[in-house]
Amino acid sequence: MLKWHDAPIRRPTARPAGFSFVNRFRISSLRRAFGLTALWLLAAAVFCDPLAAQGRVEAKYEVTLGGITIGKGNWIVTIGEDDYSSAVTGATSGIMKAIGNGNGNASVRGRVAAGQLNPANYQTSINYGPKNETIHIALAKGNVTDSSIEPVPPVANDRIAVTDAHRRGVLDPLTGSLLYVAGTGDPVGPDACHKTTSVFDGRMRYDLRLEYRRMERITFSKGGYQGPVVVCGVYFTPLSGYVPGRYAIKYLTEQRDMEIAFAPIAGTRILAPIRMKIPTPIGTGLVEATEFSTATLARAAKTN
């Protein structure tokens, strides 16, 4: 259980050097879009090997649409001195499970350089009714070196082609859900929202622009995080890999009320999403943490 507080929060001055945010906007209908987002944004139990040290977060999320629970799960992120890993799995629940049983998982590993996350290998698998799909992306220095989709999707002649230029200077969706804030001040503040990030999800290339909305204070039960969170507006711009004219793409592009709230990962200058709001024609979609525990990891002893 969590509680949101309206007390004003001091605004820090640190400016971000990178932003990320996870989402999957390649869809044929808005309902399916939110359902698939829920599958890999959320989780059932995930295991990540401990890394040398900095911080770690373990969180449980719930997905609702119009107030009805449609998915649940966990997410684990481990930030080491030189490496990081993030993994999530999720499954539909409640009425969504009755309509179309689905589950999914995603994971990424990469390097940490100057505090920023540089993904190396990303993979996601989605099973939704008769649809099963696995996507793999290999990256180096922010550039896609290889990617595949299995099974190979049918060719859509009206789909905007993804060029080599669109595969450069990008993040995978999972790394894209984590927000790095440069500086020495408190990373949880308005300046954390001043960023646009480029994402390639294996099929589509899009930009996500953040804009500061407000500060809030959150309290989690069970000894979880208690403190300030920053709420950013999110603006979606597709560049390639999508079919122009699709209703869901047009709707999300024109949407001005999407929001995401970020909380800090202890021992780092990285923020993780604890709540995402996507208004839809059939009700507000929410991906919200029900538990969020974060701790600084012990520094590993070096051996000769």
Image (cartoon, rainbow, N blue to C red):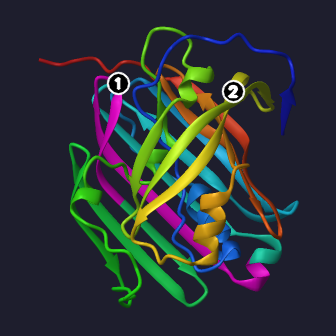
Counting labels gives 2
Residue occupying the point 75% across, 14% down:
9
Looking at the rendered structure, the secondary structure element under dot 2 is strand
Q: Is residue 75 visible?
A: yes
Q: Quarter of the image holding residue 222?
A: top right
Q: Is residue 182 above or below residue 249?
A: above
Q: Which mark is residue 229?
A: 2
Answer with left or right where residue 190 lies relative to residue 218. left
Q: Please name whichever residue, 28 or 218, is drawn nearer the observer in this view of the structure.
A: 28
Residue type at numbered disc 1: Gly
Label 2 neighbourhood size at 10 Å, few (<14), some (14-19), many (20+)? many
Residue 47 seen in this snapshot: no
Part of the protein shown in magenta = 97-122
Amino acid type of the residue tagged 2 in the rendering: Val
Question: Relative to 158, does residue 59 appear above or below in the rendering?
Answer: above
Dot 1, how many residues are within 10 Å of its Cα: few (below 14), some (14-19), or many (20+)?
A: some
Q: Which residue is at 59% across, 49% downward?
A: 235
**Residue tagged 1:** 115
